[in-house]
Image: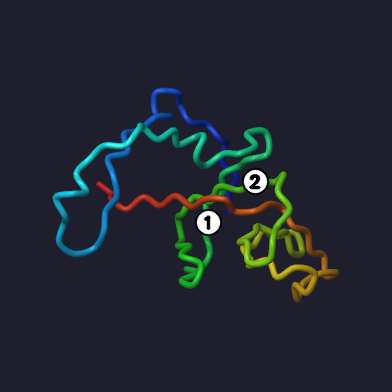
Amino acid sequence: MRILPLCIPASLTFLPLIGQVRAGFPSPATEYEESPLNIHQWLVRHEAATFLLRYGGATLEAEHICTGDVLVVDRSLTPAVGDMIVAVLHGEMRVFTWRGKTNRHEGEGWLVWGVITGIARKRHHP
């Protein structure tokens, strides 16, 4: 994984949020516009402790994480059972599901690096 700087230009902070989308045929009743969404405020709770990591491992289908995804990681949070975390295991960063004190790698050079609070995926590649 590569650590990326958290740099969201002010001009891109607010994006229009135009409603909800569902699979299947659209309903005319859903055509309304909500307030603009502040991406930075939505994804970042603690700016000084938040980092971006590009995921480079095998796809984690159950966790909906794919190679190339950008993980938003907050190092100030204490993980709760079921949270996706980034941990350092034997000097290498890895993604795990936090299972509390029963994590199988605890005591083996295991260190919780941060809690994953968001995932960004680019779907269209020109």
Residue extending furthest toward the right: 107
Relative to the observer, which residue lies in front, 30 or 75? 30
| Residue 49 place in picture, x, y as percent | 68, 39
Coloration of the structure image = rainbow
Q: Residue at x 62, y 63 (%)?
A: 95
Q: Would you name the residue on which mark 1 appears?
A: 55
Quadrant of the image for the N terminus? bottom right
Q: Secondary structure at mark 2?
A: strand
| Residue 100 place in picture, x, y as percent | 75, 68
Relative to the observer, which residue lies in front, 85 or 41? 41
Q: Amino acid at mark 2?
A: Asp
Residue extending furthest toward the front: 29
Assess disc 1: are there few (<14), some (14-19) or many (≥20) residues with their C-alpha within 10 Å of its C-alpha. Answer: many
CA separation, marks 2 and 1?
Answer: 15 Å
Q: Would you name the residue on which mark 2 appears?
A: 74
| Residue 97 place in picture, x, y as percent | 63, 67
Q: Residue at x 78, y 59 (%)?
A: 111
Q: Is residue 53 left or right of residue 105?
A: left
- The image's mark for residue 119 is none
Assess disc 2: are there few (<14), some (14-19) or many (≥20) residues with their C-alpha within 10 Å of its C-alpha. Answer: many
Q: Secondary structure at mark 1?
A: loop
**What is the tally of numbered marks visible in this picture?**
2
Relative to the observer, which residue lies in front, 81 or 98? 81
Relative to the observer, which residue lies in front, 82 or 111? 82
Ranked by sequence position, the earlier of labels 2 and 1 is 1
| Residue 11 place in picture, x, y as percent | 39, 23
Q: Residue at x 64, y 62 (%)?
A: 94
Q: Amino acid at mark 1?
A: Tyr
